[in-house]
Structures are given as structure tokens and as C-alpha cells.
Amino acid sequence: MSASPENLVAIFVMALAAMAAKGGGFLAMRWLGRHRFILAVLDHAPGAVLVSAAVVPIVNAGGAFVAGAIVAAVVTRTFGGFTPGLFAAVGAVALARWAGLP
């Protein structure tokens, strides 16, 4: 297995960015304490990252991914957890693709 230098540099830069973000979060918690704004940002950050990652396939791919996103939102809201929503979304996309949606 081999990787091009551009890919290795991209992976290294992403790792540095992740470490800088985590370090910045630790510094913010140390200086600002457990302020409710910081807690709100930390509570909503994972969802925001997932939504930003999911928007591209939903917009570009169409029907099956839109159905999966709707099912994921409903199941996550109903059952109150990420895991059931994730499995429901994967199942809905697979079922929609099997049914012939693009």
C-alpha cells in the first residue's frame, strides 16, 4: 500500500487542525470556565459537524439521501439518540436505493 505525498500532507494538516481545535477547547474551558455559552457550543458542535458532512450528499445525490435524512431526523427526534437515527438512515437509504430512487 502506498500513498502520494499530497495525501500524506493533507492527513498531517488535518491532524494538526484537530489537535489545535481540541487544545483551543481546553484553553477556553480553563480561561472561561464552565460558562453556559461554552457548554452550549460543546453540546451542539457534534451535530453541526454531522449536518455539514451530510448536506453535500443530500444536495448532490437526490432522492435516496433525502429520504434517509428525513428518516434520520424523525427517528433521532423520536428515540432521542444518535445511534438509532444513524441505523435508520442507513436502512432508509438502502431501502430507497433498492426501490429504485436515484
Image (cartoon, rainbow, N blue to C red):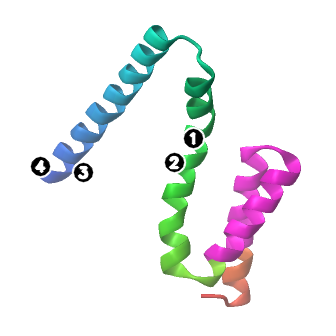
> Outermost residue, left direction?
5
Front position among marks 2 and 4: 2
Residue at screen point 61% across, 39% down: 44
Few, some or many residues within 10 Å of mark 1 (<14, 14–19, 20+): few
| Outermost residue toward the bottom in this view | 100
Q: Nearer the viewer, mark 3 or mark 2?
A: 2
User: What is the secondary structure assignment of the residue under circle 3?
Assistant: loop
Please identify, in this view, whether the residue under mark 4 or under mark 3 is nearer the observer: 4
Question: Within the image, what quadrant is residue 95 found in?
Answer: bottom right
Q: CA distance from mark 3 to mark 1?
A: 32 Å
Along the line of sight, which residue is nearer the eye, 5 or 22?
22
**Percent from the top left, x then y, of residue 8?**
19, 45
Q: Which label belongs to residue 31?
A: none
The residue that disc 1 covers is 46
Q: Which residues are magenta?
A: 65-93
Left or right of 11 on screen, residue 21: right
- Residue 99 seen: yes
**Left or right of residue 59: residue 91:** right
- Per the rendering, the mark at residue 49 is 2
Name the residue type under label 1.
Answer: Pro
Q: The residue under label 4 is which amino acid type?
A: Pro
x 55%, y 39%: residue:
45
Query: Is residue 64 left or right of 14 when viewed as pictured?
Result: right
Question: Which of the two discs, 3 and 2, labels the residue nearer the N terminus?
Answer: 3
Instruction: From the viewer's side, name the closer residue of 24 and 60.
Output: 24
Q: Which mark is residue 1?
A: 3
Q: Are marks 1 and 4 in contact (CB under 8 Å)?
A: no
Please identify, in this view, whether the residue under mark 1 or under mark 4 is nearer the observer.
Answer: 1
How would you rate the neighbour count of disc 2 (Cα within 10 Å): few for under 14, some for 14-19, many for 20 or more?
few
101, above or below 55, in the image: below
Q: Which mark is residue 5?
A: 4
